[in-house]
Amino acid sequence: MIIILRENPNMSQLQYLISWLEGHGLEVHRADSEGRPMLGLVGDTSKLDCDLILSMDIVEDIKHIKEPFKSANRKFHPQDSVIDCGGVLLGSGHFQIIAGPCSVESEEQITDIALAVKASGANILRGGAFKPRTSPYAFQGLRDQGIQLLLKAKAVTGMPIISEIMEVSQLSLFNDVDIIQVGARNMQNFELLKELGHSNKPILLKRGLSSTLQELLMSAEYIMAGGNFNVILCERGIRTFEPYTRNTLDISAIPALKTLTHLPVVIDPSHAAGIARMVPPLSLAAVAAGADGLMIEVHNDPARALCDGPQSLTPEQFDRLAASVEQARPYAYSYGENL
Amino acid sequence: MIIILRENPNMSQLQYLISWLEGHGLEVHRADSEGRPMLGLVGDTSKLDCDLILSMDIVEDIKHIKEPFKSANRKFHPQDSVIDCGGVLLGSGHFQIIAGPCSVESEEQITDIALAVKASGANILRGGAFKPRTSPYAFQGLRDQGIQLLLKAKAVTGMPIISEIMEVSQLSLFNDVDIIQVGARNMQNFELLKELGHSNKPILLKRGLSSTLQELLMSAEYIMAGGNFNVILCERGIRTFEPYTRNTLDISAIPALKTLTHLPVVIDPSHAAGIARMVPPLSLAAVAAGADGLMIEVHNDPARALCDGPQSLTPEQFDRLAASVEQARPYAYSYGENL
Amino acid sequence: MIIILRENPNMSQLQYLISWLEGHGLEVHRADSEGRPMLGLVGDTSKLDCDLILSMDIVEDIKHIKEPFKSANRKFHPQDSVIDCGGVLLGSGHFQIIAGPCSVESEEQITDIALAVKASGANILRGGAFKPRTSPYAFQGLRDQGIQLLLKAKAVTGMPIISEIMEVSQLSLFNDVDIIQVGARNMQNFELLKELGHSNKPILLKRGLSSTLQELLMSAEYIMAGGNFNVILCERGIRTFEPYTRNTLDISAIPALKTLTHLPVVIDPSHAAGIARMVPPLSLAAVAAGADGLMIEVHNDPARALCDGPQSLTPEQFDRLAASVEQARPYAYSYGENL
Amino acid sequence: MIIILRENPNMSQLQYLISWLEGHGLEVHRADSEGRPMLGLVGDTSKLDCDLILSMDIVEDIKHIKEPFKSANRKFHPQDSVIDCGGVLLGSGHFQIIAGPCSVESEEQITDIALAVKASGANILRGGAFKPRTSPYAFQGLRDQGIQLLLKAKAVTGMPIISEIMEVSQLSLFNDVDIIQVGARNMQNFELLKELGHSNKPILLKRGLSSTLQELLMSAEYIMAGGNFNVILCERGIRTFEPYTRNTLDISAIPALKTLTHLPVVIDPSHAAGIARMVPPLSLAAVAAGADGLMIEVHNDPARALCDGPQSLTPEQFDRLAASVEQARPYAYSYGENL
């Protein structure tokens, strides 16, 4: 950590600061630049209260040299992590497609879709039981019953399942769910993250709508600090000023996260764009940039002949996409030697 | 609600849609514009699944005519709400300053600050016990003990107190807290909002860092839909590209919210700017624009002589600010006749 | 165009509005929805002053049914455009890589890089002569002389060249430049766009840092309205809250623009990311999503052995990237049948 | 300037860098922090190519200690600037209201509004002649003729006038215009800024829609570097995710700019909000926060009885606002002793 001081600092305050830092067991190296000292610190600075230092009159800025995330940091864990998701491996060359409907609606619906996406090459089944909805008057999901229907589809197909948790008290319902999803709106629900840190289940952590990658990694760190290293990161679009798509898929998150962390990176193009027609080109882009997996919404409702969900693919569209992905994967960017 | 169709829609699909809408008890009025029909709906559209309609091939867009929030809507509740905060009224001309430290640190600290800010004119005491921190390694607040210390300061000064809740399971600790704060990161923690809707305590709901005002009002609606109408809205800065301040205070939120809702609006300039020196001009701006209250961080730590918190005022600075606010209030914008 | 009125509009004002619209030669169709009329207009609405209509007391909103861009609109020009760039075709299956240094520095520099990138497969040479710099004290480019050096490199290699214009008065210097670039900061320099509309040269128009795609297309429309249809669109990253990359490459711009317009779409991953290491994965993503071309910064300066430009590839890195792109192109998403 | 190096840098590259810096006449002070050296530079670093340094393998980051703007910097010019605008002073306690219509439409319109706003207390007349419009098909202003009409209104009322320039070649038309406005879209039209630097007229420079305050000051610096110190800064709203207002007025720009620069700061609440009803509370907020002036749109069109411009005040509304501002000014925040 480097502390940059204001011009011509009060010398007694500077001496006080240096003593205070040394009192925390740090070596303090001083250099000057254009009339102002700066202090280079050597030692364990993780316990320092940076806000306190920044609040001192003589301090202008602090420059962190080390990233604040440790367990998620590739520097301390150079090998890609591989996460065992109910028997299906994800990460470090194990590429997987997670597919399924936005919401679980009925046993027939979830089982039919599961069978269809499995036949097309998906290995993990998604389905929402608890639905975070902006309006209290909107459908909130089948909740407990939705989880039960997912478990039936798992029994029929043998696919591992993933579903979203919204609150600590729901945790017991997820005993037989293979991957627990934390949604974008809960990325900084720190009490929930802490609790998931005491589980040993894989957690798919979605990036918040206007969160930075470092904030995403700090939220992963909350889970990992509790002992659960089975974290999968998911980019699902960020808020920008472009109204054509619901959110803007940050494709650069793939190479950035590959550098910063060893955790696998999954892309959700369905929620990012909110437009079914854009899911195939965005999926191919994510594969090309080196993503470890895709999360795709697939809907199948013959009873509603006019509809196929504004962002969901039909099973036929998904089948074509899965085949294209399979063909394109050998030409994807490989980070192996480039990190 | 108006449904706008694509050019030259398939006629049998259009007939299907109209029948389906009529089957939901709606009158359907049709008009044409530039070769495409549009449908005006009359009746209760609140139960319609808009996503489903939008997903139909022949539908281009839906135009909502009514705001999706009802209990918070000024149209159905023209009078300003007044919230009783442990005996102190807020809203509809009752202007209040909430003041106190960011975190509760000790009995002496919180009591001393409480006495000081009360003497300067603050009527409600703030203090953080549960602290949402980006890093799992940072100080997480005194938690239960922090609430106890706040209650002691309340006993000594007679001031109502406000503190932040982070998780449903903490609710029982807030029995004697007068106002429960929901932080910006939890603005869309819908399960927490639902639970607070079953309480009858005043809830101060902070706007999320990149939330729209409608999203804020929909979150208020979650609380109100459960029966708790004691909601206070708080603007505390939004994320923009300007790095000079930590966040950007959206001063326009005051006139916008005054039009949209009857709920009181409190401004937190301390968190918005993150710079103590900017708190006084921003506070005066908020008062001038017609805010119902201010929430100001005040810190007092004689043991740390060099420090006063990067965004906190000293008691002396707060005293001067409170006096300026008092002088400026008669010249503030009044919405009385202009809504 | 649809005009949505406020609830219970004043009837004489409504009659005035309808007469006024009919006076503009429009048929007015009226429908009602939830107690408020809406007006569907049939006829040429392009001359209506929407701001004026919106300012009427009884009008709540206007819903545009047709996009405001015409010449750039795929609806009126379904076939992909092909732009002849000094003998090299771009668009509609003609994929090209534009490569070269950020700034032209010397004859040797620009010629050496030109020869290198040509050998690797680039067909168009880029090089900045006029440099838009945030600071007036920073190097502003070699200006006129930079254009001369580019022309020498063109003479030696036979490659068409592209360079950025900053001001109308510079236009005469671009007589022998094959493609004129309009930079992101000048995307809404409307007087410049108008002037370029009277040229017949290909214009590469970069999207502004926080511009929407519709704004980009409206700026293309400025050029096309003057008669110059040789417009190439370029996505080069938008401003978001993510600090890891300089800007965020909006990969969704490719499928979105492919739907909206017939103009070719080129991606500039070098400026988007600002990090050389990220250029290869982002380039492959752009190819996979169906871009018509790439614009890549390549630098080669043996005299500055330590440096290769934070976002520039070395010729060797570029050579490897060009080979990867060549291999991946057959597996790219094809819009042919999907628009 | 401080250069922060990567961990365990290559020693010969480090020696090369230090020699290179010393070759530029700089003293280099070295300190170490957590296994990596940092270099503090003493001397004139303004000519260093920071991009070049950043591109070196061993360099992680550069920390600038001095702001990159000099002429605009309050540090080197502690006294508030006062700008003489055709006889009317602005800045350093001289508060002025600029008022007038968005576009000049006719002699009668501009003269009538001028007389009205003058009677209410405005001292400077605004009116657009050249209009930057997103669409090439929209009204582009009366252009030359608009300037002539403004000059007639100036002759009748004696008020100094301000109008927007869009292109260098228009400059000769502004000979008798008292203040030249540079619009938000041209804030980084550097060639235009350079040219205005050779004028001696007051320039009102509007902040770009997603520009930072430092970028605004760097654009002011372009004008000042040419010798023209008569620059007035104008905040007119920035792009955010809030759709209720057209843009978001950044009220914090006032205290931030007051600290950073000696130039006067004018607030344009009309364009920021885009809603006439919000102009009065935002104006009072701007006054309270210590703005040096307001720029208000006023429209008066008896022939269009239904309309008063979505963001324009009527002369009657403006008269009431000007009176409120007059009353509130004594209670505004004063920066005198607090910078």
Image (spheres, coloured by chain):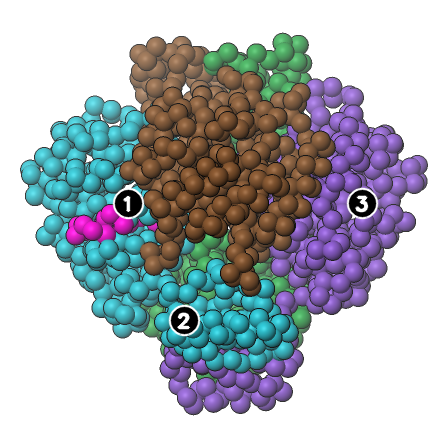
Chain colours: A purple, B green, C brown, D cyan
Identify the residue shown where x is 60% and y is 31%: C95
Contact between labelled residues 2 and 3, with CB atoms less than 8 Å apart: no
Identify the residue shown where x is 54% and y is 58%: C302
Q: Are marks 2 and 1 on the same chain?
A: yes
- Snapshot quadrant of residue D113: top left
From the image, tell me which residue sits under label 3.
Answer: A95
Mark 2 is surrounded, within 10 Å at the Cα level, by few (under 14), some (14 to 19) or many (20 or more) other residues, namely some
| Secondary element type, mark 3 | loop
Magenta residues, as a range? Answer: D194-208
Does any portion of residue D275 appear in the rendered image? no
| Secondary element type, mark 1 | helix
Mark 3 is surrounded, within 10 Å at the Cα level, by few (under 14), some (14 to 19) or many (20 or more) other residues, namely many
Query: What kind of residue is marked 1?
Result: Leu
Disc 2 chain ID? D
Q: Residue placed farthest to the front in the image? A: C156
Please name whichever residue, A7 or A99, is drawn nearer the observer in this view of the structure.
Answer: A7
Query: What kind of residue is marked 2?
Result: His
Query: What kind of residue is marked 3?
Result: Phe
- Residue D192 shows which numbered tag? 1
Please name whichever residue, D172 or A117, is drawn nearer the observer in this view of the structure.
Answer: D172
- Snapshot quadrant of residue A300: top right
The quarter of the rendered structure image containing the N terminus of chain A is: bottom right
Image position of A112 (left or right of C271): right
Please name whichever residue, D269 or D39, is drawn nearer the observer in this view of the structure.
Answer: D39
Q: Distance between the residues labelled 3 and 1?
A: 52 Å
Image position of A82 (left or right of D313): right
